[in-house]
């Protein structure tokens, strides 16, 4: 799906929502039947693999907790921001897998929690500042490098999927623009 020229950030998000994650059952629960999908039964203390969106619903119902690395938190967000700030303009560091979908969900969770007090509001505002800084840093790099000659695989492999979509589109737009300007005498 992502190789398609019309792929979007929404497509990446859809893939993320439908990827399997590990959950740890917090309590026992019989099989749950959804339209065309069965999950469970769950036995307290055991790990299971379920789709991310199902895991979020199970977590919300107090049936299970999402397990494993890759969940974004304040520590990870600070690490990414620091790493990004020390990189030179022409270099792009790799991000944790599924960074942007995780970031969107982390910020949404913090925003929901912000109604629970001033400390939560400050936590949310700090996370938004860090996220904006990361996005702006990386956006500047992607825009700059998409107008440069073809990039190496090392550079392209360090781009998140959402950034690669932007890079590909910008490169095409800039290449077409450059060709139209230079047509008729500028280049053979």
Image (tube, rainbow, N blue to C red):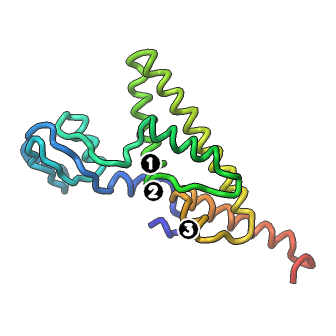
Residue that carries the numbered disc 3 in the rendered image: 5
Q: Quadrant of the C terminus?
A: bottom right
* CA separation in Å, label 2 and label 1: 8 Å
Discs 2/1, front: 1
x, y percentage for residue 159?
Answer: 56, 59
For label 3, the SS is: loop
Residue that carries the numbered disc 1 in the rendered image: 101
* CA separation in Å, label 1 and label 3: 20 Å
For label 2, the SS is: helix
Residue drawn at (78%, 66%) of the image: 177
Q: Do the residues labelled 2 and 1 touch (CB within 8 Å)?
A: yes
Discs 1/3, front: 1
Residue that carries the numbered disc 2 in the rendered image: 12
Residue drawn at (55%, 39%) of the image: 131
x, y percentage for residue 26?
Answer: 15, 37
x, y percentage for residue 171?
Answer: 68, 65
Discs 3/2, front: 2
Residue drawn at (54%, 65%) of the image: 157
Task: Identify which residue, 99 or 9, lies in the foreground.
Answer: 99
């Amino acid at each position: 799906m992502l190789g398609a020229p019309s792929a979007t950030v929404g497509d990446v998000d859809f893939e993320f929502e439908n990827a399997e994650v590990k959950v740890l059952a917090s309590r026992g629960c019989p099989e749950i039947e959804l339209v065309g999908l069965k999950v469970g039964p769950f036995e307290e203390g055991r790990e299971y693999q379920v789709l991310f969106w199902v895991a979020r619903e199970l977590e919300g119902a107090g049936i299970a907790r999402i397990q494993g690395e890759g969940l974004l938190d304040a520590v990870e967000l600070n690490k990414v921001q620091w790493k990004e700030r020390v990189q030179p303009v022409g270099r792009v560091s790799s991000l944790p897998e599924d960074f942007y979908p995780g970031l969107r969900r982390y910020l949404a969770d913090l925003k929901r929690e912000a109604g629970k007090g001033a400390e939560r509001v400050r936590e949310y505002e700090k996370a938004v500042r860090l996220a904006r800084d990361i996005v702006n840093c990386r956006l500047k790099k992607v825009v700059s490098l998409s107008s440069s000659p073809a990039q190496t695989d090392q550079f392209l492999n360090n781009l998140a999927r959402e950034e690669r979509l932007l890079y590909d589109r910008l490169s095409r737009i800039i290449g077409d623009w450059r060709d139209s300007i230079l047509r008729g005498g500028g280049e053979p």
